[in-house]
Image (tube, rainbow, N blue to C red):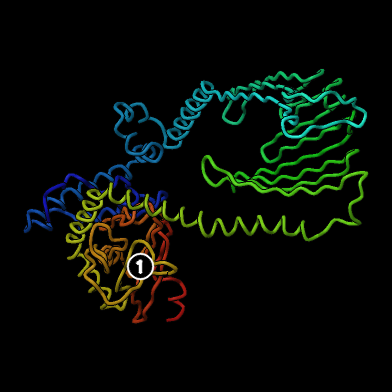
Amino acid sequence: MDEEGENILLEDNYYQLLNVSKTAPPEEINSAYRRFSRMFHPDKHSTDPNKQKWAEQIFNKVKEAYEVLSDSHKRAIYDTLGKRGLEVEGWEVIFRTRTPREIREEYERLKREREERRLQQSANPRGTITLSVNATDMFMKYYDEYEILEEPTIIPNIEVSGMTIQQSIDAPVTLRNTMTLSGNISTQNGIAMAVQLDAHSVGYLTYRAGGPGGSSMTSIYVRDSEKYHTNTALQIGTPHSFISFNIMRKLPQHDMKLRLALKFGTFGAIAEYGAEKKVSQNSSVSAAVMLGVPIPIHLCEEVLPSPVFYATVVPLVSWLVLKKVILDPIARERQERDRQRSMEANYERLQEMQRQARATIELMRETYSRIRSDEEKKKGLVILRALYGKLPPNASSHEVGAETSGDGTSPETPGPFSEVVDVTIPIQCLVKDSRLELIEASKYELPGFYDPCVGEDKHLTIQYMFHNNLHCCTVNDSQALVLPRNSEYSTL
């Protein structure tokens, strides 16, 4: 074993290091400590100076975990704040007279107070300016039936029909309540008035007199909530009067919005439906279909179904094709590129983690041989092969074959970038009285393990013999595992 980098130790997860749950009683913690002490005690590896030096470091880490978890006050601080809480000078003196429950409650209270102060100091200002411009005259002249024609002009008539300025600031009051201060001012070619009805609703009343657009009075009710945005309007005037209703369904979990709009008036009836999908941080794709029946011009007896069908199906099919052919491959390529960059950036760290795992496994070989021999004699739980890492594509388990040395290297492609490692020896060393128990936590922090594919989903596959019967099981990284299973007992 190389001596370089020996100061890098196992992760400081005391529960995972001892393979005990967070609710483990003192007796279980003592038993786990004695087991690992016998395995990693420096005196057991005194014949090899390199092994002895590494064993001393692991033994000290195991001893440190035991000293914390066996002390109720230290354990309560560790459960609440982690290792950094134990390193705060004077903390153990201040809280020595308090129970573990009081320590947790005190920390939660201080945490809530800090969060409330942070919220009180924060704000989320938002402002919008909306300018309405009528530039119809630039593209097509419009003449009202009763309008007196004038001499045509060379310069088109561009009308600024209205402007609205809105400003709001969020003021957090508590962890669950936020006060919003908002105001808006609106001006149009006429008279306008806006009233804040409640926290989510605003009412508008506008009157326009004369002008190219005619005269009208409009009443608008707008309601905006977390899931819906609705807009209801009633207009009476010339050249048209109408009533309209718009509703938008917000689906933030899918980055999507669904919209439906209906409008009835002297011009006829219009229905519109559509959807908007956010495909990246700054890009969205939207599609909408509008159906109209004008009045009083009679074009056909009924609405033709074929345009409605194609206007609905074509955008949907186009989106699915676009997603399947272009967007999904780009997303997969980006994920793979990010993964490769992450692995290259952590090359030395992965190499060191693999070296530590191999060195730890070398310390476990004697214990492995003893436990396996005892289990074979009584036909107990014998681990034939255990693989840990990323599953092959479209596979539900790793491909287990012949038994290996279990030295922490990949069974297929050795190297620091291997996505599967052999952990047969560490798993067998955790067997006690023909029983294997792994707690509900990530496995890569167990002695002899390491993370071969950072950021990827990992699984553990174990092939084993129990009472001369061959079994195989696969669990995900954080899933608890108990072997043999109850069904395997019932078959005996």
Q: Is residue 429 left or right of residue 310?
A: left
Q: Is residue 289 left or right of residue 354?
A: right
Does any portion of residue 173 appear in the rendered image?
Answer: no
Residue 85 position in % (x across, y down): 34, 34
Tag 1's secondary structure?
loop
Residue 350 position in % (x across, y down): 25, 52
- Check disc 1 and give the amino acid type: Arg
Which residue is labeled 1 in the image? 435
Decide which of 174, 483 is in the foreground and name it.
174
Decide which of 66, 204 is in the foreground and name it.
204
Quadrant location of residue 151?
top right
> For the residue carrying disc 1, how many other residues have a C-alpha within 10 Å: few (<14), some (14-19), or many (20+)?
some
184 shown above or below 41: above
Quadrant containing the C terminus is bottom left
149 shown above or below 365: above
Decide which of 403, 488 is in the foreground and name it.
403
Residue 16 position in % (x across, y down): 34, 52
Q: Give me the residue at 50% from left, 22% from top.
A: 117
Q: Give me the residue at 35% from left, 31% from top.
A: 96
Quadrant location of residue 473?
bottom left
Residue 114 position in % (x across, y down): 47, 26
Q: Is residue 131 left or right of residue 173?
A: right
